[in-house]
């Protein structure tokens, strides 16, 4: 007999613990076991593991350790789904699962998930150990697979290791096996020459991220546009005291100015709505009622523009927002409600209209533009003083700074009252770093050292749009998540993948593959601290994207565009599904102000409108409130293991679980199991059949009862959570139907807090 059609001559899957153990990123000093299956028919003579680290190659001989008669039986331990095409076909080694003995997925008619022996209740354990079948101690034949094994021993230095396999047969012919061409990890591919490598991220063993952040729900505020509260209304005359060309919107519901200034031909970003710190304080009860525990504020420091990414004075908040004392008061009020504040740090450039550059000579003192003798001259790079200098993306109002200049480093980072330390002392709990790709590693290491010295529990988040574990910027391999720079990054990879899935641009399988890649590459500490956004100040509003606007609109047309009712309702249904995924995924969900209210808008500045306090979509707000409350009430949805179960074209199903009263970080936590299922199809219902018998779960509870479709009305809170019906869950088998654009969340045990109904008083103006 020859090889079966589905049996490849060489095989390795980095997601399966039989082939790579432990899974994913590992701490320094860890030993990683790597295996390769080679079909005996190919007459293998020897195999080597090729390791690449720090521009150096190492070839390790691989030992012949086993013979497998039936590779398919061995693989069944790692696959979800049988031959009906409904399973994901991918291994379950994922976030928080270090060993397949903790959580196995066994094959079944339509997919199954393994677990305990013994009845499960709120005090019992989830998961169980299983033996791996398939290895044979008998004589080797031509119809089985030889298993080769080697160990990659990491050293004490954090960094990236890369590997692939080399196999030589009896004739001396050489074959290679490496990562797939998409570099997604998991099952790889055979190649005739050196293939793409698999990645092993090795991070500092002492790396920790703040627990409060991992457990939180974040809310991003563009300060000028959230809410205004003043003893006297802001007037045009008053605003012109700061700059004579400022424009004040007297109508809170105006569209931001999006056309170039006829005098300069540039979009000036000099129009203001008057939002301020006092306004945020006034709306803290609203944010608390929504379930928010972290506020991320776009820049607050004195600047010319409304977005304030052109910093004028790092030590002074913008007068239109309030005073330094007002900021400290905001932090104190927020903390009293269990809410922390994170600031936006823009340290790659300043404004040309600033204390430091002073191009318009509006500040006292001598700026770098004015004189080469300025104390700030060394901060900037001039080709020819004063008018030729480097700037961010060639924008002359944003001169670049030299982050290696000692006086700049002292001012921002290391001084006794440096900028980062000063604002932490005023009540901030961390920093989001703008354009972190343009900050040198040395600057980031020093920043982390000084932030953590000032407040060991402060968080550091970087703006990175790609996979941050292997990002190369300006020709240099970055080290963001190895334990000595950032805690976390903005998860644009998640955002883009989820939008693509919801819009039908990629299947659930493709979405799942993207998530598995991040899960494999990111340290666990960072993965559970990822800033999981779906909208923000740099991208069109998520509801606008999901409503499928025409792609050929002019800027003027975008400013007034209203989708058809059908498209708007479609967008709302999709947004509700996205919010559910956001709140039930590993990482820290971030809501961009107004997304929960139904705000729309294209690219900036149209995505930076004023919050519609008189026009909140109450049903959408209620949905957000319920799914946020669900996350806050159920520990497994925050720091439980992440287990993909089903990924088809339109349906994605995953579980979150805590077992042995310990979460993925080894911290004490309540046992719990949650199953989340979403159907992105707008017109087709999808039946799902999942075997949960090995979990011995006596019941599954539905916290979103009567809202199985993302466009169904949200019912008031019930005193008792309803359980899945006997027709749906019987003898450990779950059989449900997901309606078009439908979802289900099923839990065991029931959370102690029922996601509540909308408090309309809390959202009123």
Image (cartoon, rainbow, N blue to C red):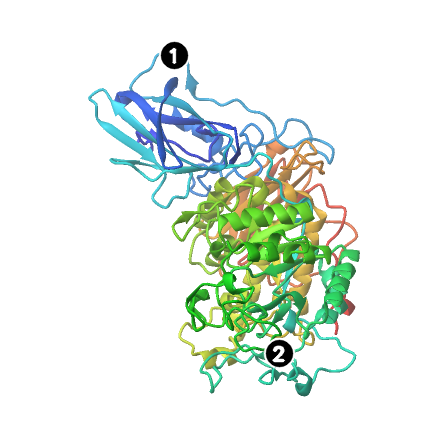
At 76% from the left and 46% from the top, the residue drawn is: 752
* Quarter of the rendering containing residue 331: bottom right
Kindly report the distance in space between the C-alpha atoms of the residues bearing marks 1 and 2: 78 Å
Q: Label 2: state its secondary structure.
A: strand
x and y percent of residue 142 in the render? 29, 19
Pick the front one: 185 or 622: 185
Pick the front one: 111 or 222: 222
For label 2, the crowd category at 10 Å Cα-Cα, with few meaning under 14, some 14 to 19 and many 20 or more, is many
Residue 295 is at least partly visible in this image: yes
Disc 1: which residue? 138
Residue 744 is at least partly visible in this image: no
In the image, 566: left or right of 695? left
Circles 1 and 2, Cβ within 8 Å, touching? The answer is no
* Quarter of the rendering containing residue 592: bottom right
Disc 2: which residue? 272
Q: Quadrant of the N terminus?
A: top left
């Amino acid at each position: 007999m020859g090889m079966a059609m589905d049996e490849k001559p060489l095989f390795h899957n980095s997601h399966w613990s039989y082939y790579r153990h432990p899974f994913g990123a590992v701490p320094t000093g860890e030993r990683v076991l790597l295996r390769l299956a080679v079909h005996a028919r190919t007459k293998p003579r020897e195999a080597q593991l090729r390791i690449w680290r720090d521009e150096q190659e190492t070839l390790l001989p691989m030992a012949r350790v086993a013979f497998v008669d039936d590779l398919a039986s061995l693989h069944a331990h790692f696959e979800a789904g049988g031959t009906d095409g409904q399973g994901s076909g991918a291994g379950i080694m994922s976030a928080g699962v270090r060993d397949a003995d903790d959580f196995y997925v066994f094959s079944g008619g339509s997919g199954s998930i393994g677990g305990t022996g013994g009845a499960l209740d709120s005090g019992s354990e989830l998961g169980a150990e299983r033996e791996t079948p398939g290895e044979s101690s008998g004589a080797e034949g031509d119809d089985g697979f030889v298993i080769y094994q080697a160990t990659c021993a990491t050293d004490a230095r954090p960094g990236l290791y890369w590997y692939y396999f080399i196999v030589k047969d009896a004739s001396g012919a050489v074959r290679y096996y490496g990562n797939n061409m998409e570099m997604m990890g998991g099952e790889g591919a055979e190649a005739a020459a050196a293939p793409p490598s698999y990645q092993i991220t090795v991070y500092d063993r002492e790396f920790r991220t703040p627990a409060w952040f991992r457990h939180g729900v974040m809310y991003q505020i563009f300060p000028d546009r959230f809410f205004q509260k003043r003893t006297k209304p802001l007037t045009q005359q008053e605003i012109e005291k700061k700059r004579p060309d400022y424009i004040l919107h007297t109508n809170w519901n105006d569209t931001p100015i999006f056309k170039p200034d006829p005098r300069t031909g540039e979009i000036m970003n000099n129009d203001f709505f008057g939002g301020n710190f006092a306004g945020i304080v006034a709306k803290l009860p609203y944010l608390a009622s929504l379930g928010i525990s972290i506020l991320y504020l776009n820049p607050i420091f004195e600047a010319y523009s409304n977005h304030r990414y052109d910093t004028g004075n790092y030590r002074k908040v913008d007068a239109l927002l309030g005073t330094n004392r007002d900021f400290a008061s905001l932090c104190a009020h927020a903390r009293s409600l269990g809410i922390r504040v994170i600031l936006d740090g823009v340290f790659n450039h300043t404004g040309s209209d600033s204390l430091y550059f002073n191009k318009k000579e509006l500040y006292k003192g001598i700026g770098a533009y004015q004189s080469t003798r300025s104390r700030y001259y060394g901060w900037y790079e001039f080709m020819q003083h004063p008018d030729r200098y480097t700037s961010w993306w060639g924008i002359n109002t944003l001169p670049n700074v030299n982050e290696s200049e000692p006086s700049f480093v002292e001012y921002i980072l290391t001084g006794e009252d440096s900028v980062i330390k000063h604002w932490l002392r005023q009540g901030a709990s961390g920093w989001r770093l703008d354009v972190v790709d343009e900050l040198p590693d040395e600057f980031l290491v020093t920043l982390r050292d000084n932030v953590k010295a000032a407040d060991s529990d402060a968080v550091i988040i970087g703006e990175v749009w790609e996979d941050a574990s292997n990002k190369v910027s300006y020709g240099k391999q970055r080290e963001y998540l190895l334990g000595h720079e950032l805690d976390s990054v903005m998860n644009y990879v998640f955002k883009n993948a989820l939008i693509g899935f919801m819009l039908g641009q990629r299947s659930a399988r493709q979405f799942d593959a993207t998530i598995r890649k991040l899960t494999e590459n990111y340290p666990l500490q960072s993965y559970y601290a990822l800033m999981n956004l779906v909208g923000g100040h740099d991208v069109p509003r998520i509801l606008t994207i999901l409503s499928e606007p025409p792609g050929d609109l002019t800027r003027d047309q975008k400013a007034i565009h209203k989708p058809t009712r059908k498209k708007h309702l479609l967008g709302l249904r999709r947004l509700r599904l996205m919010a559910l995924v956001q709140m039930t995924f590993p990482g820290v969900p971030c809501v961009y102000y107004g997304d929960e209210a139904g705000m729309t808008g294209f690219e900036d500045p149209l995505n930076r409108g004023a919050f519609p306090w008189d026009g909140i979509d109450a049903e959408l707000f209620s949905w957000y409130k319920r799914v946020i409350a669900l996350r806050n009430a159920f520990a497994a949805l925050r720091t439980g293991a992440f287990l993909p179960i089903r990924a088809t074209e339109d349906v994605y199903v995953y579980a979150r679980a805590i077992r042995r009263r310990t979460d993925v970080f080894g911290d004490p936590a309540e046992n719990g199991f949650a199953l989340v299922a979403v159907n992105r199809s707008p017109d087709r219902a999808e039946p799902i059949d999942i075997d949960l018998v090995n979990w011995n779960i006596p019941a599954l509870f539905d916290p979103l009862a009567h809202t199985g479709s993302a466009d169904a009305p949200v019912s008031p809170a019930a005193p008792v959570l309803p359980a899945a019906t006997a027709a749906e869950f019987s003898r450990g088998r779950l059989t449900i139907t997901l309606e078009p654009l439908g979802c289900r969340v099923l839990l065991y045990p029931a959370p102690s807090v029922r996601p509540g109904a909308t408090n309309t008083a809390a959202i009123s103006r």
